[in-house]
Image (cartoon, rainbow, N blue to C red):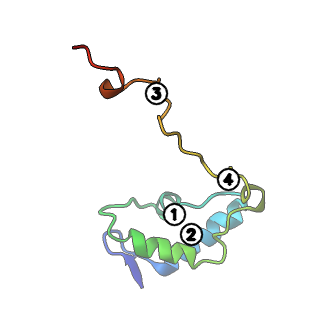
Amino acid sequence: MIVCHCTQISDHDIRAAIDWMRSADPETIITPGKIYHALGKAADCGGCMPLFLDTMRASSKLEVPAQLANLRAGPIREKNNEGRRQGYRLSEQGSAA
């Protein structure tokens, strides 16, 4: 099945590129950009990205290497003031009447 009509990339091409990259470097992180590069092509309009990503995710060799799987930090806590100093808003600076 053709996944990217602009560059004529098929689902078979995507799976073959993933297999080749995983064989060449078992620890690599595989991205759509790396697949395009491995196939000697470049993304054009981006309309294929949802199907392209679904095809990538369906590959059994896409998994993240074990030593990188748990590197994500804990939940990110949002700051209410975005790191700005107190009283940065005009409404907080008081009236100069």
Q: Residue drawn at (57%, 79%), measured in percent from left and top? A: 58
Residue 8 % position (x, y): 36, 74
> Can you identify the residue that label 2 sits on?
17
Q: Position of residue 12 (x, y in %)?
A: 51, 80
The mark that comes first in sequence, 2 or 3, is 2
Position of residue 43 measured from the top left corner of the image (x, y, whole percent):
37, 61
| Pointer 3 local density, CA inside 10 Å: few below 14, some 14–19, many at least 20 | few
Task: Report the disc number at residue 72.
Answer: 4
Picture residue at 74% right of the left edge, 57% below the top: 70
Per the image, the residue denoted by label 1 is 35
Pointer 2 local density, CA inside 10 Å: few below 14, some 14–19, many at least 20: many
**Quarter of the view holding residue 51:** bottom left
Callouts 4 and 1 close, C-beta under 8 Å: no
Whether label 1 touches label 2, CB < 8 Å: yes
Q: Which badge, 4 or 2, is on the more N-terminal residue?
A: 2
Which residue in the structure is indicated by mark 3? Answer: 84
Say whether residue 13 is left or right of residue 3: right
Please indicate whether residue 41 sits to the left or right of residue 58 in the image: left
Question: Label 2 is placed on what type of residue?
Answer: Ala
How far, Cα to Cα, is label 1 from label 2? 6 Å
Q: Earlier in the sequence, mark 1 or mark 3?
A: 1
